[in-house]
Amino acid sequence: MRAIFSSLLAFLRQLFNTGKASAPQEQEQEKVIAPPIFTETKESIKPIIEHTTASVQKVLIVNNQPYTFAAPTTRDVSRVFIHCTASSNPKYDLASVKRDHTNLGYKRDDGVLDVAYHFFITFAGELQLGRKLWSNPDAQKGHNTGTIAICLQGLVVKDFTSAQMETLTALCQQINEAYGGSVTFHGHNEVSNRGCPVFDYRAALKLDSKGNLGV
Ligand SMILES: [Zn+2]
């Protein structure tokens, strides 16, 4: 009787222990496996979103080096003006514009002759630096103070390229971010009777009626 009882007890112990041992193991496995999967999934979502946002914003390149717009500390900026060149000839480049502007007597804030614009975007979408940002531009008569001037190569609407629009958008996004969204974007024609720029900059930058960037 005792033998039967003890073997039954041993059986029950074994059963109990086995049950007891397997249950926490499963729980432990769940605890160990579940959180990393969850964390990993949560963490992997964030970089994907950031990556997507970053890839939409084209990386700007100047002279084969990554370029990041930095707001000048010497002056306030509230408006950005978009221009186009006076010719659609691909040879009419930044150097040509600078030569013409210098001949026309366009001056920086310190009186030195210089190209009127801060930025130039070629047909290939290449971003080139013109006037230093510490100076106001000399591009919108009577409306130069507190502005940044960007000029796109081209005079005929069909000649402008998507590469140019991508660079323009990326540059304007960076400028807008640098000023915490407080700057507005405009065409030269908004403050002049000149048909400059000739392309639909409002559509390209998805501007609202006040000139806030929509891209
Ligand atoms: Zn203009």
Image (cartoon, helix red, strand yellow):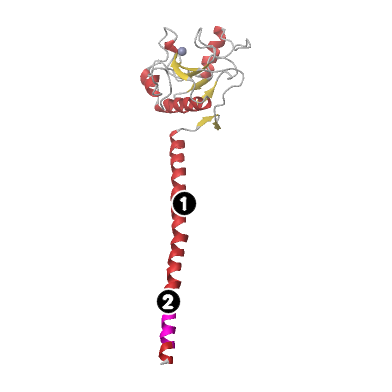
Q: Earlier in the sequence, mark 1 or mark 2?
A: 2
Foreground pick, 154 / 211: 211
Foreground pick, 82 / 71: 71
- At x 53%, y 26%, the residue is 178
- At x 43%, y 41%, the residue is 49
Position of the C terminus, as image quadrant, is top left
Give the quarter of the image for residue 201. Answer: top left
Q: Is residue 178 above or below residue 78?
A: below
Q: Is residue 12 magenta?
A: yes
Foreground pick, 209 / 120: 209
Q: Is residue 13 above or below residue 132?
A: below
- Amino acid tagged 1: Thr
Q: Residue 106 placed where, x, y %?
A: 56, 9
Q: Main secondary structure of the magenta part?
A: helix
Classify mark 2 as within 8 Å of ligand 1 or not, answering yes or no: no
Q: Which residue is mark 1?
A: 39
Q: Residue 113 placed where, x, y %?
A: 60, 11
**Which labelled disc corresponds to residue 81?**
none
Question: Is residue 133 found left or right of 188 in the rendered image?
Answer: right
Position of the N terminus, as image quadrant, is bottom left
Q: Which residue is mark 2?
A: 16
Please report contact status of discs 1 and 2: CB closer than 8 Å, yes or no: no
Q: Is residue 62 magenta?
A: no
Q: Is residue 50 above or below residue 13?
A: above
Q: In the rendered structure, which segment of residues is drawn in magenta?
A: 6-13
Q: Residue 18 placed where, x, y %?
A: 43, 76
Q: Can residue 99 be seen? A: yes
Q: Badge 2: few (under 14), some or many (20 or more) residues near its Cα, within 10 Å?
A: few
Q: Can residue 124 be seen? A: no
Determine the secondary structure under disc 2.
Answer: helix
Q: Nearer the viewer, mark 1 or mark 2?
A: 2
Cα gap from disc 1 to disc 2, whole angstroms: 35 Å
